[in-house]
Structures are given as structure tokens and as C-alpha cells.
Image: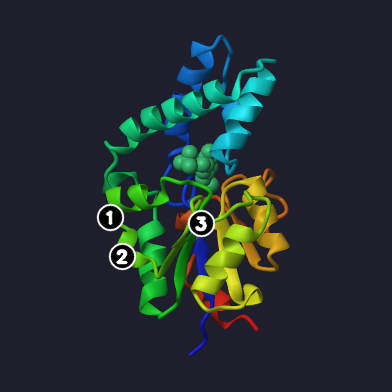
Amino acid sequence: MNRKGFIFDLDGVIVDTAKYHFLAWRKLANGIGIDFTEVQNEQLKGVSRVRSLEKILGWGNKTISGKQFAELMTKKNDDYLRYIDQMGQDEILPDVSRVLDLLITKNQPISLGSASKNARIILEKVALRDKFDAIVDGNDVSNAKPDPEVFLRAAESLHMKPNECIVFEDSVAGVEAANRANMISIGIGDAVVLSHADYNFKDFKEMSAQFIEQLINKK
Ligand code: BG6
Ligand code: MG
């Protein structure tokens, strides 16, 4: 039986947490006198927590001490976790469960490959933890996307070679990371934004069982 390594990004692919990141970052930015819009939030997709705060401070032309930086990071995450705490299975994006279950039925190894340090908590909250053979997240890597480290680690955890892996991603940085890892990249979301992906889908509702079968059997 053919096997491929299937690697899923979390935020924006499995659950729509961008709205909670937005609320927490906006509160933080406004609190230090910086405007923060949804357009800016788009630019933080797939970007690590540290880098996100650096970008916000840059947009506001603000310099702060290392101590303050650390305090703001903690504050942002505390706020974010308050939203996460309310999450349930109804927040799983459409047809994600169908695709995961199909892959499991077909005996395909599945890993998470996320920049988030909250990935495990979120998977528990939406009761998807058991569907994954491996989890690689922001706690396990030192180089953020677009560096391919997170996906290379995920491939290793699944005992698959990079060119045997397929990555589902909603961010430009994530698609680039998958391409740099020599994996098949599947953009989930806006095909124009994710034009560097090997394949594009608006969401998992558009992804047929036949397409997944083709991926599994691809030489
Ligand atoms: C990514 C999100 O998945 O994780 C980013 O797209 C986020 O918006 C990053 O900043 C880090 O997440 P966390 O949960 O560790 O702050
Ligand atoms: Mg994402």
C-alpha cells in the first residue's frame, strides 16, 4: 500500500484562530498607542509570536526594552488563551474531519506542523489530538517559517522522506517553507495570495476523495 506523510498547519487550516490572534494583538497594540487593522493581521499569518510583536512595534515606530517586550508577549498570550479556552469542536473548519478520517482509513501517517506554541492545547480543545501520529509545533523548532525546519521535523517524526510529504498551509510563509522542504505544497485559502503552492483549494470542502487518492499514489 502506498503511503505519504500528510502534514497539516494548524491556524487557518484546521481552525480559524486568526480572529482570536487579531483580537489579542489589537488590544495589545492599542494599549501602547499603535493602530492595528485586519489587513496588518493578515501579514502575521504563519509568523511566530516574537516576530509578530516585532512587526507591530515596527508599524508603530516604537522601541521598547527587552523586559517590556517579554511582558507584552506574555500579556498577548494570556489574552489569546482566554479565547482558546472557549473553543470547541464546532470551530473545526469545514471538512477537515472528513479529510483526516479519510487519511486514517487509508492508513496514511499524519503530523501537525505549526508555528504555534499553543498547538497541543488547541488540538485538545477541538478533540482532534488523537487523529495525529505526530505533533511538531513552535516549541520544537528554532527557525520559524519560511524556514523548512518545522516540516522537516514533522517528516522525520513520521519516518517519511521530505519528497514523500504533502503540506496543507494557509500562509505565504508556510507554503514557502513546504516548497523549501521539497514537499508538495497545498494552499488552503486565496489562490492568488498562495500562488506559489503546487495545488490550491479554497477550503477542504473542495477537496475530493479522488484528489487525495491521487496524492497517495503519486510517484
Ligand atoms: C501561527 C499563526 O500558526 O502561529 C500566527 O498563524 C501565530 O498568527 C503563530 O503568531 C504563533 O502562535 P502562538 O500560538 O505560539 O502565539
Ligand atoms: Mg496557518
Label 2 near label 1: C-beta < 8 Å? yes
Q: Nearer the viewer, mark 3 or mark 2?
A: 3
* Residue 198 or residue 127, whichever sits in front: 127
Q: Position of residue 196 (x, y in %)?
A: 72, 54
Which label sits on residue 127? 1
Q: Position of residue 70 (x, y in %)?
A: 51, 28
- The relative height of residue 217 versus residue 18 in the rendered view (above or below) is below
Callout 1 amino acid: Ala
Secondary structure of the residue carrying tag 1 is: loop
**Crowd tier of the residue under label 3, counting other residues whose Cα lies within 10 Å: few below 14, some 14–19, many 20 or above:** some
Amino acid carrying mark 3 in the image: Asp
Residue drawn 56% across the image and 78% down it: 160
Can you name the residue that lies furthest to the top here?
33
The residue where tag 3 is placed is 140
- Give the class, few, some or many, for how many residues have Cα within 10 Å of label 2's Cα (few <14, many ≥20): few
Q: Is mark 2 within 8 Å of ligand 1?
A: no
Q: Which mark is residue 94?
A: none
Please give left or right for residue 90 compared with residue 38 in the image. left
In which quarter of the view is residue 55 placed?
A: top right
Is 97 situated above or below 59? Answer: below
Check disc 1: other Cα within 10 Å, few if <14, some if 14-19, many if 20+.
Answer: few
